[in-house]
Amino acid sequence: MSGVQLSLIIPAYNCEGFIAGTLASAIAYLERRREPYELIVVDDGSSDGSAPLLAGLSANHCSVHFIRNHANRGKGHAVRAGVMHSSGEWVVFTDADLAYPLEEIDKVVRALEGGADLAIADRTAPQSLYHMSPAFFSYLYTRHLLSRLFNLLARCWLGLDARDCLLVQALVIFAEERSIQDEPSVGRMSDRATKYVGITFQDETVGDLR
């Protein structure tokens, strides 16, 4: 056992302008938890200066690990790479722009500690809160409708009883990372204990909630 309690994975793509601040915030949050951790940052083939910047930042901190994808293969692949390299008791990933305040990770970890195999941060949950500029409303509404339509089609096609297609991605990664051999299909895995967690979402134009 590595002794690492929490593995935090951050997929990144062309984030040169803000990724140093993201890592500083993530390290500060993880240090406040006062337990062994690892921060895994996966650069998904960025075309800007993100990769050398991340390599330098990770070299200066023993708990920060840098993974470089030499081609852009998408967020799902980047998250999978991070999970496959993780060693923590709990494995969580979040976006590089920190649209979800890092303290929200505590809710996810509590759900896992409470017995959930998977904890999904769900913006559509009744407990979720939104902090955003009114200028962001039309974009959010359009994205929400398209997201719900895509999820409905995917659920019908795959035969899954899941509110969020992120669950499908998480289930597959979960099976691979934990070497589950007795699950013949993703459909059967959707019966595992899954907890949807209400989350706080902040539009980047609003500023830091902390």
Image (cartoon, rainbow, N blue to C red):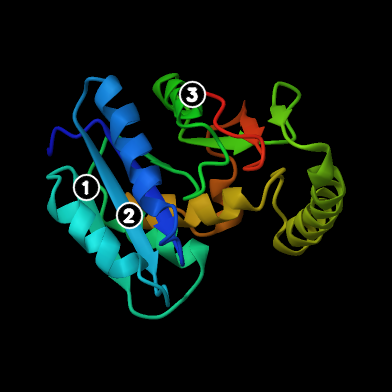
The reply to whether residue 179 is in sight is no
The reply to whether residue 29 is in sight is yes
Residue at position x 69%, y 44% in the image: 162
Estimate the spatial distance between the alpha carbons at disc 3 and disc 2, rounded to whole Å: 24 Å
Estimate the spatial distance between the alpha carbons at disc 1 and disc 3, rounded to whole Å: 25 Å
Per the image, the residue denoted by label 3 is 111
Per the image, the residue denoted by label 2 is 41
> Toward the viewer: 25 or 169?
25
Q: Badge 2: how crowded within 10 Å, few (<14), some, or many (20+)?
A: many
Tell me which amino acid carries mark 2: Val
Tell me which amino acid carries mark 3: Ala
**Horizontal and vertical percent position of residue 134:** 83, 38
The secondary structure type at the circle numbered 2 is strand
Q: Badge 1: how crowded within 10 Å, few (<14), some, or many (20+)?
A: many
Tell me which amino acid carries mark 1: Val
Q: Is residue 48 left or right of residue 190?
A: left
**Horizontal and vertical percent position of residue 115:** 44, 23
Residue at position x 34%, y 28% in the image: 29
Estimate the spatial distance between the alpha carbons at disc 1 and disc 2, rounded to whole Å: 8 Å
Q: Badge 3: how crowded within 10 Å, few (<14), some, or many (20+)?
A: some
Tell me the quarter of the image containing the N terminus: top left
Do the numbered discs 1 and 2 sit on residues whose CB atoms are within 8 Å?
yes
Per the image, the residue denoted by label 1 is 64
| Picture mark count | 3
The secondary structure type at the circle numbered 1 is strand
Foreground tag (3 vs 2): 2
